[in-house]
Image (cartoon, rainbow, N blue to C red):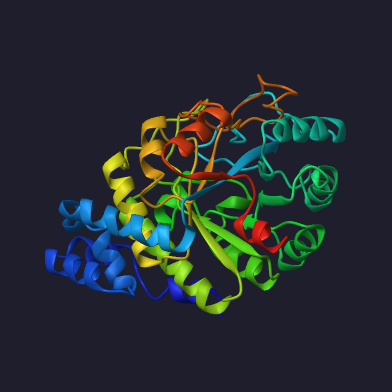
């Protein structure tokens, strides 16, 4: 059994209607409970919950303090390649986007790693496009070997792999794997992924199961907010999280909240989620699952990121470059998308400190176990 079996028990319209039918009483009931279920999560992300946003934010803040204290885990994405064989309507790396492609060489990987290390980071996220003939498992293993002396914590966000390949990454020292479904809406998924291996909806859907079977320490989930109805996508993502935590209970989990951003050759979707709604979603996740790590990237504005520090976020990037070699090797190479918060890591860490929080530059668990 995989998550596909759980997923097929529901329809998109059924879940969408469930969420829209939630009432004020459902919201109040969810807020009064100490242990929530998926029905409660549906209430907290529903339109009926918007008038309760202040209560949700207060509860989210209290729960985050209890579990994580006044800490924000910091990380930096390191893009290794913009080569990709998929056509994705929202991504600057899309195969049909006729731009210069680049994959970092060994010396360039080391140079980028050194530049990121100089910024103060000890946690790096390796990212590539999906081009199996160029950026494959041997390439990843080599990159990990090259950067391992520089970082105590390495995460990876690449194309879906087989369970045995994830086991190889785990053995090489990878701490966490991030794999986003993009959207749980099959029709929207088909529309936005018309060509390439990524067009296989169910292969991607079952990827976290393969990661869990590899016994990786942490799995990162998320939906790309803007491809379809954000509430329904988020419910399915929460269902996915709930399923994985029960099946792979020794693994830790994180949730990310990427909103579609401008990129070369990309038209922004009309499926908009406002700042207020994004705050609602983050608080709903925290109340639903006090232990899950919640990550907010530089896709968001400086104002939003400053405000979310105390309201539920536990992991944040800073000074991010979304192009291969962006930190030192080739700052002008194609970005996957435009970031919004362009402050340096040092500038953002000052904001964190000013709010009475501590910026942690490597994963909590690793820090406490060493």
Image point (57%, 29%), residue name: 346
Asked whether residue 224 is in view, the answer is: yes
Which of the pair 107/70 is nearer the observer? Answer: 70
Which of the pair 361/38 is nearer the observer? Answer: 361
- Residue 78 position in % (x across, y down): 68, 38
- Residue 231 position in % (x across, y down): 31, 55
- Residue 227 position in % (x across, y down): 40, 45
Image quadrant occupied by the N terminus: bottom right
Residue 166 vertical placement versus 79 (above, below) = below
Query: What count of labels does the image hold?
Result: 0
Q: Residue 62 sits in which quadrant?
A: bottom left
Asked whether residue 226 is in view, the answer is: no
- Residue 230 position in % (x across, y down): 34, 51
Task: Please identify the residue farthest to the top as the structure is shown.
Answer: 332
Image point (47%, 67%), residue name: 240
Residue 152 vertical placement versus 327 (above, below) = below
Image point (63%, 39%), residue name: 77
Image point (78%, 45%), residue name: 133
Quick check: 132 left or right of 299?
A: right
Which of the pair 217/4 is nearer the observer? Answer: 217
Quick check: 309 left or right of 144?
A: left
Residue 99 vertical placement versus 227 (above, below) = above
Q: Residue 49 sits in which quadrant?
A: bottom left
Image quadrant occupied by the C terminus: bottom right
């Amino acid at each position: 059994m995989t998550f596909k079996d759980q997923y097929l028990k529901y329809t998109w319209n059924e879940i969408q209607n469930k969420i829209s039918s939630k009432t004020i009483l459902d919201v109040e009931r969810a807020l009064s409970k100490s242990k929530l279920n998926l029905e409660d999560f549906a209430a907290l992300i529903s339109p009926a919950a918007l008038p309760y946003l202040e209560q949700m934010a207060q509860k989210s803040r209290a729960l985050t303090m209890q579990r994580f204290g006044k800490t924000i885990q910091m990380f930096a994405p390191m893009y290794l390649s913009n080569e990709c064989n998929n056509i994705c309507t929202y991504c600057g790396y899309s195969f049909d986007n006729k731009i210069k492609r680049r994959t970092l060489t060994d010396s360039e990987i080391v140079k980028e790693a050194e530049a990121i290390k100089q910024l103060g980071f000890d946690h790096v996220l390796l990212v590539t496009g999906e081009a199996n003939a160029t950026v494959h498992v041997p390439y990843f293993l080599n990159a990990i070997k090259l950067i391992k002396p520089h970082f105590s914590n390495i995460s990876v966000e690449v194309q879906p792999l087989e369970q045995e390949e994830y086991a190889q990454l785990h053995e090489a020292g990878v701490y966490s794997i991030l794999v986003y479904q993009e959207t749980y809406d099959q029709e929207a998924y088909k529309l936005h992924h018309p060509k390439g291996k990524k067009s296989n909806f169910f292969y991607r859907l079952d990827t976290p199961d393969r990661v869990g079977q590899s016994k990786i320490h942490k799995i990162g989930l998320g939906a790309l907010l803007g491809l379809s109805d954000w509430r329904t996508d988020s419910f399915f993502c929460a269902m996915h999280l709930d399923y994985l935590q029960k099946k792979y209970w020794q693994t830790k989990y994180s949730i990310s909240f990427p909103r579609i951003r401008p990129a070369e050759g990309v038209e922004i979707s009309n499926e908009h989620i406002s700042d207020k709604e994004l705050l609602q979603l983050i608080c709903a996740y925290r109340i639903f699952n006090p232990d899950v790590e919640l990550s907010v990237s530089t896709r968001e504005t400086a104002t939003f990121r400053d405000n979310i520090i105390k309201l539920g976020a536990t992991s944040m990037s800073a000074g991010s470059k979304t192009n291969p070699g962006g930190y030192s090797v080739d700052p002008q190479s194609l970005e996957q998308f435009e970031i919004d918060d362009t402050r340096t890591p040092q500038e953002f860490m000052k904001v964190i400190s000013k709010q009475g929080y501590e910026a942690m530059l490597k994963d909590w668990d690793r820090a406490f176990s060493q």
